[in-house]
Amino acid sequence: METRPGRPAAALSPPAEMAGRCRTFPGERLRSLSPERAPKASVSAGPRADAAEVLDLHLVKHPVTGGWRLTFQVRPLSKDPIELRAYLADGDDVVTETWSYTLLP
């Protein structure tokens, strides 16, 4: 399991107040899902609904591990810490643990 903070390449850079996140979800069940049957990513930002916007969400099969890599941007809407959470689901079945991360201002 890994989390990578960062910003996109300079040519595609969002405004300075945005932060990029990358999370790889491993697991045997995820390796069995093909790109044609990709899981659905659920990402939330809190603790309040108006804490941040989650933008530019992408989910791709990792070519080496067979897991799935989730990338997204976060635009804070306040000066408070933001609680990020993400998980992957196959239909109604949640197939990963819930990833949590606190983004500090």
Image (cartoon, rainbow, N blue to C red):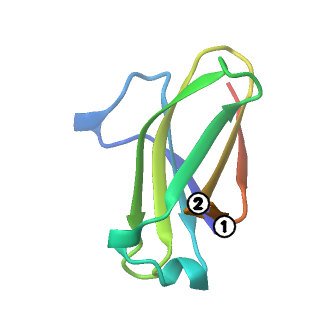
* Label tally: 2
Residue at disc 2, secondary structure: strand
Q: Quadrant of the N terminus?
A: bottom right
* Residue at x 47% of width, y 63% of height: 69
The single residue placed furthest to the front in the displayed view is 92
Q: Residue 78 carries which label?
A: none
Task: Give, as a three-letter code, the residue at label 2.
Answer: Leu
* Residue at x 50% of width, y 75% of height: 67
On screen, 48 above or below 9? above
* Residue at x 61% of width, y 80% of height: 27
Q: In this view, does 9 lie to the left or right of 37?
A: left
On screen, 4 above or below 57? below
- The image quadrant of residue 35 is bottom left
What residue would you read off at disc 2?
88
Task: Give, as a three-letter code, the residue at label 1.
Answer: Thr
What residue would you read off at disc 1?
96
- The image quadrant of residue 84 is top right
Whole-angstrom CA distance, mark 1 to mark 2, is 6 Å
Q: Residues within 10 Å of mark 2 (few under 14, many from 20)?
A: many
The single residue placed furthest to the top in the displayed view is 78
Contact between marks 1 and 2 (CB within 8 A): the answer is: yes
* Residue at x 54% of width, y 65% of height: 24
